[in-house]
Each structure stands twice: as structure tokens, then as C-alpha cells.
Image (tube, rainbow, N blue to C red):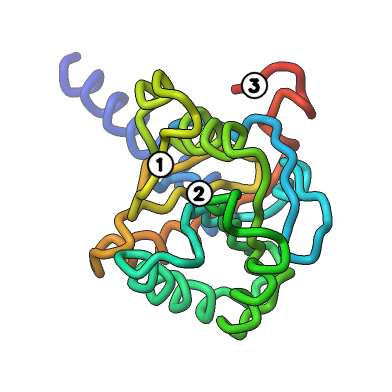
């Protein structure tokens, strides 16, 4: 009797394994998903061409998000070098983009961002530079992308300054995935590249942002 029960159990295990194999064969559903850590809140900024950019421009895109300023002589050039490699790898992907926010809107005007973009020799449809109100830019860094500690918002906005070497990654649904990526560490840039590839393979079934669903995830 025990042998019969054991036989049935083994048969059930094999049958279940075969079923799962055929269901997930040829898909990435069996892989560990990149964790969701936040989602993109509504925003409205102006790009290097003077055009309005909102969260809707991220819909259906895998986006790398950074914060920088054009006069930076410290980590920004190294960050730009790391990001340029990512840009060169994925610039031909129709669903990929980079969204770069200035942390010095009082200095980085639309004209200055345009000059900076031209000096970088980038396609500004793929690598978008934005400016806007300082409090709005900083709020996005903290509440959407988790690139700065929200506790820093206790200071007066004119006294605040974000200077981060980290990038964030947004999926096609407007979800921030995988935490942050250190632009100064080669292994983390390799991980960013891998995660971008994985997210580009994912399908998009709507936007996680409350503007589109009224029920943010």
C-alpha cells in the first residue's frame, strides 16, 4: 500500500513538473523578478528644447533616471561617462530612454541644457534633460526615485542641494525597479545594463501611476 501511495506521489510530482515546464517554456516567468521599490509620481518639467515633459512621456519606456548639473567638476563627468556607455548600448532600442534632471535649475536654463546636450553629442529624444522648479525636481528625486533621503526636505529649499552618484531604473509601467545603481562602480553598471535588458523584454499592461489607474501599485 505504501509503495502504491509513493508511486502515485512521484507520478503527481513528475506530472506537475511537466505541466510547469510546458507553461513557462520560452518565457521569462520562471526568473526572479527585479523588485519594485516605488513608482513615478506625476511631474511636469521642461526639456532642453523648451518642450513640456511629464510622467506620461515615460509610459511604455524603460528609463534610466539621473540627477546632475552642467557645471559639476566632481562626480558628474564620471557619471556621464558611465551613462554614455549605457546610452550607446541601448540607443537603438525604441522603448529605452534616459531622463536627466538638473539639481541647479537656477543655473541650468533651457539654453544651457541645450548647449550641454549638444556638447555630449546625444540624441535628445533618447536622452532628455529637464529643468523646472527646484522643489518639484527634488521632490521627484525623493518620493519617486528614492535617490535622496526625504528627511533632507526639512531644510529650506533654497539651502538644499542633491548631489548623488546613483541612478534609478523605471519600467514600462512607471514602476521604479531594483533600487539604485552606483554610477561609479563598474559591477553596478553591468547590473544596470542587465536589468535594462530584462525590463525591455517585459510587456506593458498599463501604467502604475495614479494618473492612469487611480490606484498606484
What's the CA distance linking mark 1 and mark 3?
Answer: 29 Å
Q: Which mark is residue 103?
A: 2
x and y percent of residue 196 in the render? 49, 60
Residue at mark 1: 161
Q: Residues within 10 Å of mark 3 (few under 14, many from 20)?
A: some
Q: At x 19% / y 14%, what residue is drawn?
A: 1
Position of 101 with respect to 52 (left or right) is: left
Q: Position of residue 151 (x, y in %)?
A: 35, 21
Query: What is the quadrant of residue 182 in the picture?
Result: bottom left
Above or below, 113 against 145 in this view is below
Evaluate if marks 1 and 2 touch, with contact meaning CB atoms under 8 Å apart.
Answer: yes
Inspect this view and state whether residue 29 appears: yes
Residue 114 versus residue 55 in the image, above or below: below
Q: Residue at x 59, y 50 (%)?
A: 105
Q: Residues within 10 Å of mark 2 (few under 14, many from 20)?
A: many
Q: Which is more toward the observer, 204 or 45? A: 45
Mark 3 or 2, closer to the camera: 2
Q: Mark 1 and mark 2: span between their CA atoms? A: 7 Å
First in sequence, mark 1 or 3: give its number: 1
The furthest residue to the left: 2
Amino acid at each position: 500500500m505504501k509503495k502504491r501511495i509513493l508511486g502515485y506521489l512521484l507520478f503527481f510530482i513528475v506530472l506537475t513538473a511537466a505541466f510547469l515546464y510546458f507553461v513557462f517554456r520560452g518565457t521569462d516567468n520562471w526568473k526572479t523578478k527585479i523588485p519594485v521599490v516605488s513608482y513615478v509620481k506625476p511631474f511636469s518639467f521642461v526639456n532642453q528644447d523648451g518642450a513640456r515633459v511629464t510622467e506620461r512621456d515615460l509610459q511604455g519606456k524603460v528609463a534610466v533616471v539621473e540627477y546632475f548639473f552642467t557645471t559639476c567638476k566632481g562626480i558628474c563627468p564620471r557619471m556621464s561617462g558611465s551613462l554614455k556607455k549605457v546610452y550607446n548600448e541601448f540607443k537603438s532600442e525604441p522603448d529605452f530612454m534616459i531622463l536627466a534632471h538638473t539639481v541647479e535649475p537656477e543655473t541650468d536654463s533651457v539654453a544651457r541644457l541645450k548647449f550641454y546636450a549638444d556638447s555630449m553629442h546625444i540624441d535628445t529624444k533618447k536622452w532628455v534633460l529637464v529643468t523646472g522648479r527646484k522643489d518639484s525636481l527634488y521632490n521627484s528625486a525623493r518620493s519617486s526615485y528614492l535617490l535622496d533621503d526625504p528627511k533632507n526636505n526639512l531644510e529650506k529649499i533654497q539651502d538644499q542641494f542633491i548631489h548623488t552618484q546613483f541612478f534609478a531604473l523605471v519600467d514600462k509601467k512607471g514602476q521604479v525597479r531594483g533600487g539604485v545603481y552606483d554610477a561609479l562602480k563598474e559591477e553596478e553598471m553591468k547590473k544596470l545594463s542587465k536589468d535594462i535588458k530584462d525590463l525591455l523584454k517585459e510587456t506593458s499592461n498599463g501604467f502604475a501611476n495614479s494618473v492612469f489607474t487611480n490606484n498606484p501599485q
